[in-house]
Amino acid sequence: MEVIVCPDAEAATSLVAKLIADRLRAKPELVLGLATGRTMERVYDHLVAIRRSTDLDFSGCRTFNLDEYIGIPGDDAHSYRYYMNRHLFDRVEIAAGNAFLPDGMASDLRAEANRYEQAIREAGGIDLQLLGIGEAGHIGFNEPLSALKSRTREKALTQITREQNAAMFDGDVNRVPLRALTMGVGTILDAREIVLLATGKAKAAVLARAVEGPITGMISASALQLHPNCKIVVDELAAAALT
Ligand code: F6R
């Protein structure tokens, strides 16, 4: 893996947006794997700014998000579908039918997970997967003890993750869902290229374990060490514990 250290979060998020734009220009029918979370908000802002100031065109692109909460409908402001509409899909020309997230309201979650895997396969696989990292070491919602070969499935969220995400639920951890549908670690590793973005000092310790520690199911992000084409883009704060 290649680690790229940027001076600050603004530079790191801008670099990732430029990389996505470059890949989309090179391949207009790009299959893009997307993430949500606070870190990504600036990436989408930069991407929208590039779209508005250049000829970048999202109309041929298909997107697959990593995850979605179970039991929160897409029109609820806490859902990841709502987040993506607000931060990206409503601001560029990605057709609704080309923007996929797992359906956390599906009555049969196992069937929904299989359907999602099938949709990724039918799209030809993911060209570029964007990732953040949780304080529990997760990528997507692959919490500790996720198998390296795991595929899209239902996963219970750890208390650390629920506390990390409580800010999006008015600071009330009890309102953060207990479960989510998430691409598996194996699904993520199948992407042809991966970019993980981490900013801020809260990510420094877990990032060092992911990048320099042993590959372990306790830190799902450590599986990225196995990927042949993976970039880790960080700001100086998140890079602080790297040797
Ligand atoms: C969400 C996702 C998560 C986040 C991670 C970091 O779709 O994939 O793995 O990337 O929890 O979240 P923030 O950026 O809020 O610290």
Image: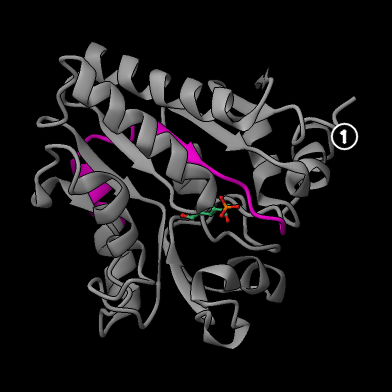
x 27%, y 44%: residue: 88
**Residue 43 rendering spot, x and y as whole percentages:** 43, 35
Give SS at disc 1.
loop
In the picture as drawn, the residue positioned furthest to the right comes out as 243
Q: Which residues are magenta?
A: 117-136
Q: Is residue 139 above or below residue 83?
A: above
Q: Is residue 234 left or right of residue 85?
A: right
How packed mark 1 is, by other alpha carbons closer than 10 Å (few <14, some 14-19, many 20 or more), is some
Q: Is 145 part of what is drawn in magenta? A: no
x 43%, y 48%: residue: 35
Residue 200 occupies which quadrant of the picture?
top right
User: Which is more toward the observer, 185 or 9?
Assistant: 9
| Residue 215 visible in this rendered orientation of the protein | no
Q: Is residue 103 above or below residue 36?
A: below
Q: Is residue 52 left or right of residue 12?
A: left
Q: Is residue 5 left or right of residue 72?
A: right
**Residue 53 rendering spot, x and y as whole percentages:** 22, 18
| Residue 11 visible in this rendered orientation of the protein | yes
**Residue 54 rendering spot, x and y as whole percentages:** 20, 14
User: Which is more toward the observer, 58 or 120?
Assistant: 58
Residue wearing tag 1: 241
